[in-house]
Amino acid sequence: MNPIDPQTFDHRTAQISTGRLYHFIDQIPKDYDPTRPPLICLHGFPDSWFGWRHQIGPWCRQGFRVIVPDMLGYGETDMPQNSSAYSTKNICNDISALLDFLAIPKAVVIGHDWGSYTAGRFALWHPDQIHHRRDVPRLSIPYVPPKEQHMSVEEMARKYPSYGYQMYFASESSTSEVEENLVPFLGIVFRTPEKALSWSKLDELITNKQINFTNDCLLNEHELQFYVFRFQRGMRGPLSYYRTTKMRFEEEKEAQLPAHLLPNLPVLFMYGTKDATCPPSAVQNAHKFISRLNTAQDRVTTQVLRFLSSLGSAQQSRM
């Protein structure tokens, strides 16, 4: 597995029971021990399975089967045109169906960005498929419970200015505008922390054609071209996640999803200290709903392995 060569990973496609075609990486270690819980990694926006390229190899070499799908609307996975397909309930049902297709009864779910939000909701919609003796590692987006009252994207942007970009992404106009400015848009999204751009300025910059791609991008030319090629397919799918706010609220209210995750479920949350969309108050609030929440500001690959190892050791000591 070479992180700079996507073809060195084990690619698969499957028509799952929800009717969707999913593309995914299924990396199985040599001498795999099936008693070890598989890891399923969920990416965010705007990304693909490729966003986990540096973690798949190290985790696989430590004996874990690593499954990384292109989420709905991304890469080689189906891209429905109706935004309702991208509600978290539907996405969680897809992930559940993918695990069923692979005959995996329980897995450790790891998520980043939208994938982090989805991982938390997967633990509510499909708690029986979460490996309770392990954990749900989450990156960037802290757990928030189902809301008692609906808050529109506009209200959220007024209350939390750092989420102003979501109002733009939720608008239909953003689809064509981002598609027309794909390379500079990716340059903004993947900027180095020192050159981070306020998301509240994104709409203005794109509308006025003021985006300039610079050398401040975290991606090298090869990586950038990978993403450009994948997103040339269209941005309606990826942006549709931001257009499901009300639907998510209604689905969760109807199902009466609980606010708290299961008390025996350990959760690792990792976040960036310079991430304006992840304030310390949000991290602290998550402790109210997750009894076994661990937080870290560390390198993803090693920290997740360390946490999985510590849980395994704790189990052995109780046996």
Image (cartoon, helix red, strand yellow):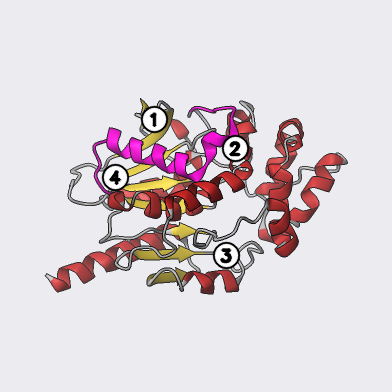
Depth check, front residue: 51 or 139: 139
Q: Residue furthest right?
A: 208
**Vertically, is 245 above or below 223?**
below
- Residue 284 included in the magenta stretch of the image: no
In the image, what residue type sits under mark 1? Thr
Locate residue 308: give its quadrant. bottom left
Tell me if mark 4 has few (under 14), some (14-19) or many (20+) residues whose alpha carbon lies within 10 angstroms of its own: many
Tell me if mark 2 has few (under 14), some (14-19) or many (20+) residues whose alpha carbon lies within 10 angstroms of its own: many
Q: Name the residue under label 3.
A: 272
Q: Which residue lies furthest to the front in this view?
A: 254
Distance Cα–Cα, label 1 vs label 4: 23 Å
Q: Mark 4 points at which residue?
A: 65
In the image, what residue type sits under mark 3? Gly
Distance Cα–Cα, label 4 vs label 2: 27 Å
Residue 44 spot, x, y in % from top left? 54, 46
**Vertically, is 229 above or below 263?**
above
Location of the C terminus (image quadrant): bottom left
**Vertically, is 3 above or below 136?**
above
Q: Which residue lies furthest to the left in this view?
A: 319
Answer whether labels 2 and 1 touch (C-beta < 8 Å).
no
Label disc, if present, on residue 233 of the rendered structure = none
